[in-house]
Amino acid sequence: MKFSVLMSIYHKESHQHFDRAMRSVWDEQTIKPNEIVLVEDGVLTDGLYQAIREWKERLTNTLQVVSLKENVGVGAAKNIGIEMCNCELISVMDTDDVSLPKRFEKQLAVFENQDVDVCGAWIGEFEFNETQIISYRRTPEQHNEIVAFAKGRSPVNHVTAMYKKSWVLNVGNYAKYRTSEDYNLFVKLIMAGAKIYNLQESLVSVRMGNEQQVRRGGLKNAMFEADVQVGFYKMGFLNFFEMIRNVSVGFVIRMLPSVLMKVIFKMIRKL
């Protein structure tokens, strides 16, 4: 089955991390993608441009680079990237994470053998050494469990997602949020009747550092999250009690000091 890999990159990314991500989706995979679509979300650093040029030289007929003049955010950048993908199946990848060697092989097998529209997996989180996983974010396997899980948290680890382009376009693509655009997408897909399945193993290793924790906290992020939950209520996905619960819990967590917030997120991983 043919598939595209979709990535977006912005100026704060490390060129070393980008190179590692690219090696994990090309050099190390048992099944290679038919194309890689990379969206440059605004002006990048010299190091990133150099790394992208080197990969473009290697993958002349595979790597498609889309350059945006201004930073528009992950959701808007991926909206543009999805339109540029030529394959019906699209695999999402972040430019600082590491896909394990059999990721694509295992996800393609799900699409070949099951009636699904989205396939995710667990992620393993690391701080400095990708071989030293400190925690996992586990997501439920079957669709009915996934729907129930989505009432409180995003039901698919976005960096592991492989989905059908037609379904994503049918529900209006990613929302132009600066946060939770992936959660919003999966809820819209559920509401539209898409079938979701999560492999019960980690297929992507994700960098987790202090910077990521800081990005999640603060009043602005708490307000963003509240808007997302209100949106789910208006869509009919959450009832009033569920909305109030999610807004309240999210607000408290995001207003905690970063050290405590990190502990809370680790505890949530184990639930």
Image: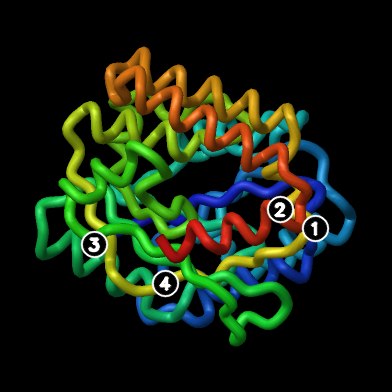
The numbered mark at residue 1 is 3
* Mark 3 residue type: Met
Q: Residue at x 39, y 54 (%)?
A: 161
| Whole-number angstrom distance, CA of label 2 to CA of label 3 | 37 Å
Q: Sequence order check: which comes first, mark 2 or mark 1? A: 1
- Which is nearer the eye, 84 or 151? 151
Q: How is the image coloured?
A: rainbow
Q: Residue at x 41, y 44 (%)?
A: 154
Are circles 4 and 3 on residues that touch, CB within 8 Å?
no
Residue denoted by label 2: 213
* Residue 137 appearing in the image: yes
Q: Sequence order check: which comes first, mark 4 or mark 3? A: 3
Identify the secondary structure beneath mark 4. strand
* Mark 4 residue type: Leu
Q: Residues within 10 Å of mark 1 (few under 14, many from 20)?
A: many
Q: Is residue 253 above or below residue 22?
A: above
Are circles 2 and 1 on residues that touch, CB within 8 Å?
no
Q: Sequence order check: which comes first, mark 2 or mark 3? A: 3
Q: Sequence order check: which comes first, mark 4 or mark 2? A: 4
